[in-house]
Amino acid sequence: MHGESLIIFLIVGVLAGWLGGIIVKGYGLGLIGDMIVGVIGSFIGGWLFSYFHILRAGGFIGDLIGATVGAVLLLFVLRLVRRAR
């Protein structure tokens, strides 16, 4: 992974985590937390989209959509786990 790719990956992660925090109301985790959720969410979203053979747009927007879907799912699961305690 080149330097530019890493920066774009982190930007997509931060944006996806931030969007996920907005969609899942009241669950923002700060900049670092949103970045971690977004990066993990991008893996989850990419896996889900390929598993269910869902085609997404290429490029930055497609990556952002997949990462946001994964981040929302991850935040939803985190909310369920915290609520169970």
Image (tube, grey):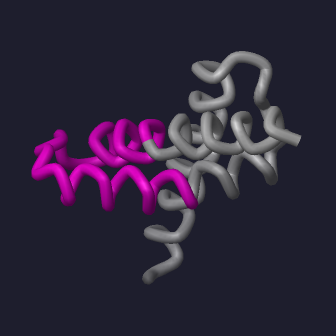
Left/right placement of residue 31 relative to residue 52 reads: right
Give the position of the C terminus as an image quadrant: top right
Residue 17 found in image quarter: top right
> In this rendering, is residue 10 above or below 63?
below
Pick out the residue farthest to the front.
Answer: 84
User: Where residue 38 sits: x, y (%)?
Assistant: 59, 49
> In this rendering, is residue 64 above or below 2?
above
Left/right placement of residue 67 relative to residue 46 reads: right
User: Where residue 26 sits: x, y (%)?
Assistant: 79, 19
Left/right placement of residue 18 relative to residue 47 reads: right
Give the position of the N terminus as an image quadrant: bottom left
Residue drawn where x is 70% and y is 36% of the image: 80
Residues rendered magenta in the picture = 40-69
Residue drawn where x is 40% and y is 41% of the image: 64
Question: Is residue 57 found inside the magenta-colored segment of the image?
Answer: yes
Left/right placement of residue 44 relative to residue 63 reads: right
> In this rendering, is residue 69 above or below 67?
above
Residue 76 found in image quarter: top right
